[in-house]
Image (spheres, helix red, strand yellow):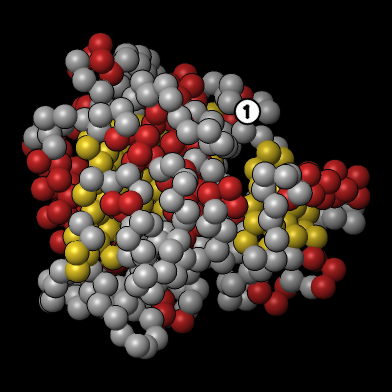
């Protein structure tokens, strides 16, 4: 790849990285902020013109913004497993959706999470928000390396009653440290800020890791009246979606402001990303999110389902105002955090690679040039600018009927066709065969054994 094309460093004379121990006498804190079903460009600095995200934008201004950052799946549970373990969902043992029923297991306990890695290095570890990778005691957060946990274990909850938001039977789903608690009528994002700031306050004297996983803009789309009024002139469902994105941004800002107030911001690495693209499901009003030039959305391996907004910020320690176009994946998060925090021991089998050199120097020495996805019968391979999707799905209105039987192998060159609008498999049979072979080698690797 051509590095002059791949990375655009906006800032001149970036701050040079210093090891955390030399700069601050202690290891840095780490916060992963995960939003849910946020569209590929639904942050102002990623291209959105009709919604307001000042706190997400501030994180980007104080760090590195990634334009080719992919998640491990186009649905919630496997994407989260990828982030937590540094592995593809298949290797992490959770290739599909975890159950939202109490007592059901999820990601196998032998998987080592980022919480366990940092806990082993002396960190206090906390989870606040959505979990959705296991609902049995051993697969809930306290069984997966977290010292503290507050939130819901299933896929989504009503923000006021805290009941599972799906079809019946209705089930209450709010837990603190493995014990069911009741906060009827209190807005869940407000509770998240309360619990997150309490965790930070209680652990400010030592390094901490906080996994702050929002259940928004995922349905139910329940923004406060303030933001409903702010977007009253937008048409639905964009109006409701924009309101919940801005509400989420506001809650993120409250946590960051608390860090600033406590004097912890400059010793805290913040990683922001969405778990997958935006949803077209009926419960969202049929859409509302925006994937910009990218095709598809949630449930789809077109880029609109897996290319997401992502930012890494460590104020005063890493370059700021950088726009990075290098190819990265969410499984890179675990080894990158370990690298930045000086944790030398990471679990065996981690497939992600540290992107510390990309963040600090703009060097692509980890060469993550070939990526793989599998979601049910869908699969995809990206190699350089080429991408091949097997059995593609496009949930977006107006596009889903454009997939024909002959498109069961859908080949594109993203440099020429970022919207993945034209299948060029017939024009490039050699490239098609080459990428099919890549997929088969990955699929039938003995350690993988994908069904």
What residue appears at the point 57 percent right and 58 percent down from the top-left corner?
Answer: 95
Q: How many marks?
A: 1
Residue at the image position 70 percent from the left and 66 percent from the top: 377
Tell me the crowding category of disc 1: few under 14, some 14 to 19, or many 20 or more residues within 10 angstroms, Cα based: some
Q: Quadrant of residue 405?
A: bottom right
The vertical placement of 219 against 383, above or below, is below
Camera sees residue 226: no
Quadrant assignment, res 203 = top left
Question: Is residue 256 visible from the viewing direction of this image?
Answer: yes
| Residue at position x 37%, y 88% in the image | 168
Which residue: 15% across, 45% down?
199
Left or right position of 315 against 237: left
Where does residue 250 sit, x and y in percent of width and height? 21, 55
Observer-nearest of 448 and 157 = 448
- Residue holding disc 1: 367
In the rendered image, residue 221, in percent from the top left (x then y), is placed at 32, 74
Q: Secondary structure at mark 1?
A: loop
Q: Residue furthest top?
A: 22
Quadrant of the rendering where the C terminus is positioned = bottom right
Residue 436: give x, y in percent of width and height. Answer: 82, 50
Q: Which x, y percent locates residue 176?
A: 19, 60
């Amino acid at each position: 790849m051509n590095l002059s094309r791949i990375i655009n460093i906006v800032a001149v004379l970036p701050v040079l990285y210093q090891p955390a121990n030399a700069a601050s006498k202690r290891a840095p804190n780490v916060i992963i902020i995960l939003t849910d079903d946020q569209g590929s460009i639904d942050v102002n600095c990623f291209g959105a013109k009709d919604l307001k995200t000042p706190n997400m934008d501030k994180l980007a201004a104080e760090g590195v913004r990634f334009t080719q950052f992919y998640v491990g799946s186009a649905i919630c549970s496997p994407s989260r497993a990828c982030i937590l373990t540094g592995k593809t969902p298949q290797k992490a043992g959770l290739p599909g959706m975890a159950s939202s029923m109490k007592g059901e297991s999820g990601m196998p306990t032998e998987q080592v999470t980022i919480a366990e890695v940092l806990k082993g290095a002396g960190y206090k570890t906390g989870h606040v928000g959505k979990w959705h990778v296991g609902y049995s005691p051993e697969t809930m957060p306290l069984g997966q390396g977290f010292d503290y946990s507050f939130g819901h274990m299933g896929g989504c909850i009503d923000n006021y009653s805290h009941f599972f938001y799906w079809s019946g039977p209705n089930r209450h789903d709010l837990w603190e440290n493995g014990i069911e608690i009741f906060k009827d009528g209190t807005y869940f994002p407000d509770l998240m800020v309360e619990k997150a700031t309490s965790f930070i306050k209680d652990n400010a004297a030592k390094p901490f890791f906080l996994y702050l996983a929002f259940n928004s803009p995922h349905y139910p789309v329940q923004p406060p009246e303030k933001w409903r009024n702010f977007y009253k002139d937008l048409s639905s469902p964009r109006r409701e979606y924009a309101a919940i994105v801005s509400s989420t941004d506001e809650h993120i800002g409250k946590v960051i402001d608390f860090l600033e107030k406590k004097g912890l911001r400059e010793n805290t690495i913040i990683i922001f990303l969405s778990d997958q693209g935006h949803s077209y499901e009926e419960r969202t009003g049929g859409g509302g999110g925006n994937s910009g030039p990218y095709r598809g959305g949630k449930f789809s391996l077109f880029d609109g389902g897996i290319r997401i907004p992502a930012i890494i910020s460590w104020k005063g320690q890493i370059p700021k105002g950088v726009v990075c176009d290098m190819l990265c994946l969410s499984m890179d998060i675990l080894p990158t955090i370990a690298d930045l925090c000086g944790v030398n021991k990471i679990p065996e089998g981690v497939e992600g690679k540290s992107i510390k050199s990309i963040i600090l120097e703009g060097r692509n020495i980890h060469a993550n040039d070939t990526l793989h996805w599998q979601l049910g019968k869908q699969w995809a391979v990206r190699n350089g600018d080429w991408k091949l999707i097997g059995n593609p799905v496009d949930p977006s209105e107006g596009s889903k009927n454009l997939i024909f039987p002959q498109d069961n192998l859908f080949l594109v060159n993203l440099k020429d066709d970022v919207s993945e609008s034209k299948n060029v498999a017939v024009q490039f049979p050699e490239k098609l065969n080459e990428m099919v072979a890549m997929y088969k080698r990955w699929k039938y690797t003995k350690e993988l054994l994908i069904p």
